[in-house]
Image: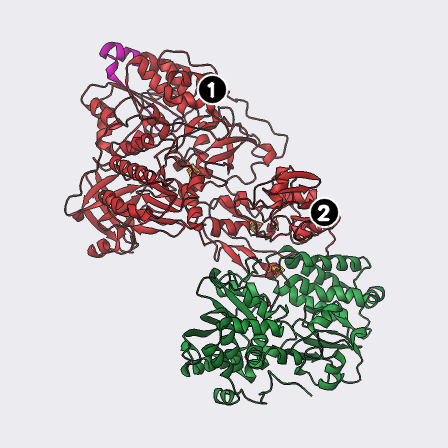
Amino acid sequence: MESRVLLKNRKPDRILDLAEYRASGGYSAAAEMLQTGRPADVQEALEAAGLLGRGGAAFSMGVKLSTVAEYAPFPRYMVCNADEMEPGTFKDRVLIHTSPHLLIEGMLLAAFSARAEHGIIFIRPEYENAARILEREVALAREQGLLGKNIFNSGFDFDIVVHRSGGRYICGEGTALLNALEGKRPNPRKPPPYPTVKGLWQLPTVVQNVETLCFVPHVVQNGAEWFRNLAAGPDEAGTKIYSVSGRVRRPGCYELPMGTALSEIIETHAGGMAGNGRFKACLPGGASTRYMPESMYHREMGYQSLSDAGFRLGTAAVMVFDHSACLVGATVNLLAFFARESCGWCTPCRDGLPYLHDLLRRIENGQGRAEFVPMLREMAGQMGLAYCAFAPGAAAPVESLITYFEDEVREHIKAGRCPFREAE
Amino acid sequence: MPKLIIDNLEIEVPEGTRVIEAAEKLGIYIPRFCFHHALGAVGACRVCAVKVLEGAVEGVQMSCMIDAQDGMKVSTTDPEAADFRRSVIEWLMLNHPHDCPVCDEGGHCLLQDLTVAGGHSIRRYEGGKRTYTDQYLGPLVQHEMNRCIQCYRCVRFYREYSGYNDLGVTGIAGRVYFGRLREGVLESPFAGNLIDICPTGVFTDKPSRYTGRRWDFERTPGVCIHCSLGCRTTVSARYRQVGRMEGRFSQRVNGDFICDRGRYGFYYADRPGRPRSGRISGQTVSVDQAVYEARDRLQRITEEHGPQAVGVIGSGRSSLQTQSAMVHLCRTTGWQGPVFRNTRITGAAADTAACALNPENAVSMRELETADAILAVGADPVNEAPVLALAMRQAQRAGAQITAIDPRPLEWPFDFEHLACRAEEIGEALASAAERLSDSRRPVVICGTEITDAGIVLQAADLVAGLRGSGKTAGLFCTLPQANSFGAALLDECNACAADLAARVEAGQIRALAVIESDLWHDFPDRPQLEKALEKLDLLVSVDFLDTPLFEKADIGIPSLTVFEAGGIYVNQEGRAQQVRPAHTGGLPITVTGAGDHPPRTFAPNVPGRDMPAAWVTAFCLAGQAPPETDAQMTAWMRYNFAVLSDLARMDADGVRLFAGGKTPIAHEATMPEKPEQCLELLLAAAVFGGEPMSDYSQCLRELAGLPAVWMDRADADRHGIAAGDRVGLGFENGEVSFVVRISDHMAPGVLVVYRHPDIDWQPRAGDTRYNIREDRIRRIEKA
Ligand SMILES: Cc1cc2nc3c(=O)[nH]c(=O)nc-3n(C[C@H](O)[C@H](O)[C@H](O)COP(=O)(O)O)c2cc1C
Ligand code: SF4
Ligand code: SF4
Ligand code: SF4
Ligand code: FES
């Protein structure tokens, strides 16, 4: 029983086109809001709904909008983050291929709230199909007066351009993304000032993830309470698209009440463990979150619930490992990615991650030594002092590996080889 | 003002002070790589971690990124912070080569210091090191990318601070690379600062590579004398030879940085051809012999023809000591002069600029950085006073609007509006541009003296006075031709320039000339006139540390000491007198025998001592007087004898400001002649590398001067069917000179601009720095 809000119009082989979207009530929320509402109405509804950012940081969108000061300068920018480079995450792509106008309407409403006139969709270059869909649908929306000047005769102007990213993971980080758009190196910026105060070209800019924006028309139309009630628990709000992958029978995107238990996601929706595998661990929210061990199997997968337990839901990209998977090997793999994708700005990340990678690789290859374990633990902890959230994210799998699977690591060292590999 | 506690010590600092700076005030040096007080904090290296025990955000924080706040309690020794700093050093050393003995940074390397200080001495990492290919970056800066620790200081200086874009960062993660897109000569005339600013051995001083460790050098605070700004330097000398020059921080003058002319201009001091012994009629004699011979023969001419028969010529590159001794020489003997100016029109402009400055309107370069509007009139800082361009860029980055009124194709490393007009239209343009300053609160008018005349300088000074009258804190910033042109203007007592003396030689009134550290040959506007005059002389005495053509031609040549050997006081263009201490003793550099072989080394046996006198000592001797015995006595003597110099007593680390105090400048012909029809106006303009008499001796800078070029406005070029890159000949009375053509869309039409170049030795007749050339005397020699 999937509760479909965002994916309710999902078709197996095509997008929901503009006519279908409008027939199903699309753009009516925007029409009404632009004609009769105030910008603050959108912001207030979102804040009351408790819509948290779905790009990984889980920051309240309503609160973020409230930081665009009334007398802040113009023009202002509404940026949709469709970079989706977090390993294991594939929900934004599905959303764009499902209902591009839901995203466009969401951007329109968010822009109205921030009184932004320029919209930019910053999209991962591998998503060329999605980018073309968006370009085409943006043009159609413009033709129908849903974008452009004086939308719905409200006097409000807003238009959208689609910008393809240079194609590195760090470009998806909200502030690095702004530098990238300005044609600079995608090094993150250190707030303050926050992008809503000084973002693109030092002007107020709101950056939101695709999934977050897709909720906006629904919240505006149905209200905060409706949204909160979609969740599985009282401390959560809305639904969440879980991108489930790994050792499950039916990997895919599942839109479920926020806070659905992990066991339910795996067993009821993803078809259970593949083969005769037993659940060993999962990364709950992409590559930059901590491993959840077996003891967490029944945990509710909501932002609040996971953070209470010391984990992060991130993008809710659930990567499932069974008992036959070597987590040392998996972590080596992740670290190779992170060490390669560091923007190169700060020392812990640029030089520390390759060090972590080297140590773990040696362990995996049977050259590990006992003193590597405390080194890994110390350095993984020190990644928290890097310049941006990249390095602590990259260290999360390492740190949780040492915390929950230290025995497995030490077994590698003691045996002088990976116990999961066939002995040579 | 927040009061905080760092390592149990209390300190109060101004609002906005970073914790790392507050600690420094307490004498606690927190490690840093990316932080630099001129470039600011960016939080990249993470080595400045401290623990905030009490404060708004507690825990381990980067001390360069947090402002000191009232009631804050900080520990720099907290184990968590110290461990983290140790890790950062270890991470930085993963890829860093372990070959300090062959790295030229060794001994003054921040990475070396902090690695040792942080206790990282045993390598744990077992992986390999990444390596890079180095680039050829020109004759000044050596590149060794393997040594990079990615602090980003170089690009922050090069691109953000100084506004040049040919050096940058490429790549991400562990492969970030700092260099040019393609190897090649660095375009910035400030590139040498990369050497000072890079905390490791990536960028090192190329000409002086492997000539010594920092501890081998005697390091002396110096002042640059290659333009009128007087930037502070640190002179490194070894074996009685200057080896290296670095920028030295100055609160008021240059801040941290210097230009490459100033950094590499010193090679004149030890070139093989430098005069080191006396010369009489081409015969080498002792210095004393030459001095006595000169004194006696000048004496004889004075007795036979009267004191009016001897003229004395000096320059703005001499120290205040030498200039005042020359004035004293003429006072006591009755000889004519000294004249410190070679040209009439620009000479008068420079004198006027110095005299127009007063304690109210004078601004330092640091103050100029806070200007909110700048109007530059006939000034090209990049070429005439390079570090001024850096100061203007800082003002522009902080929001100042900059307008330039100038005929030249200005290429400045910041945004500005260029009102291109011919030199004689500058006054008019200035009058109508003045209103651009009406909305500003701290406007500065910059006025050059290379292509302007006294009238324009006065107009600029009046504009500033008017702005001040309407309640603005307006400032006047004039650039002058030479390092001590201001001193010359203060001391000048005779209403003449070298051209006047030459005329008197031609008229037979003057029979002997004593030229002391003069660039007469170099900038006298009319070479044939000069040659004729010299021919007519009974006696030419030249005192110099440069082997100028004039020195070669002199009947008696007397060597003098350079600023590195004699020191001296130099007054920069804002009237700031700065003391330079000698950096090494005079005499031949000590040469190492054994051709650089393995030690033990023996030194050449003929080590001459401090065998040359400073020019001011010679000046006293020529007057038949005993010079003051010490530098201190000389300074006292100057204060006593020259009222304008009495404030030298108050000289401190920032120097002391001297003003002309209402002195009326020398009245030469004030304005330039109008341009006749059918003529293009040819401007001879200063170039950053080329045409400054001393730095022209530096081989490494000559390499940067490019080919002699003439710049043309596009319309003028089209009319002549000339394209960029063509070779043209310009016909002057005394022959044709050939140039490569450069074309600009943003210079004044009707003007040709030739930047001074060490390879063009040509003085158009009767010009000053301007010359009217008939259009039919422009001939294409070769197509591009
Ligand atoms: C290293 C890194 C990579 C990120 N990549 C993405 C991304 O690809 N897409 C995304 O929406 N957010 C990404 N984020 C999160 C953004 O910084 C930002 O929080 C988000 O786009 C804000 O939108 P939201 O509040 O709607 O989630 C990334 C963050 C980090 C630290
Ligand atoms: S942690 Fe540092 S190096 Fe890594 S992505 Fe962020 S800023 Fe760049
Ligand atoms: S080259 Fe030098 S200044 Fe530039 S980043 Fe590397 S270490 Fe820093
Ligand atoms: S700007 Fe002038 S004084 Fe300063 S370093 Fe350059 S040449 Fe020397
Ligand atoms: S000095 Fe503070 S982070 Fe580099």
Tell whether B527 sits left or right of A385.
Answer: left
Residue reaching furthest to the top = B303
Secondary element under disc 1, as helix, strand or loop, is loop
Residue A271 in view:
no
- The first of marks 1 and 2 along the sequence is 2
The residue stretch that appears in magenta = B298-319
Tell whether A374 sits left or right of A40.
Answer: right
Secondary element under disc 2, as helix, strand or loop, is loop
Task: State the residue in front, A180 or B288.
Answer: A180
Amino acid type, residue under disc 2 in the picture: His
| Mark 1 lies on residue | B611
Task: Confirm whether the magenta stretch covers residue B75.
Answer: no
Task: State the residue in front, B719 or B671.
Answer: B671
Tell whether B507 sits left or right of B696.
Answer: left
Name the spot of residue B530 as percent of width and height, x first: 24, 29
Dividing the image into 4 quarters, which one contains the C terminus of chain A? bottom right
| Mark 2 lies on residue | B120
Please determine whether, in this image, residue B348 is positioned above or below residue A293. above
Chain the render paints red: B
Task: Confirm whether the magenta stretch covers residue B300.
Answer: yes
Q: Could you tell me which residue is drawn at 50 percent across and 78 percent down?
A: A104
- The residue carrying pointer 1 sits among few (fewer than 14), some (14 to 19) or many (20 or more) residues within 10 Å by Cα, namely some
Name the spot of residue B601 as percent of width and height, x first: 61, 29
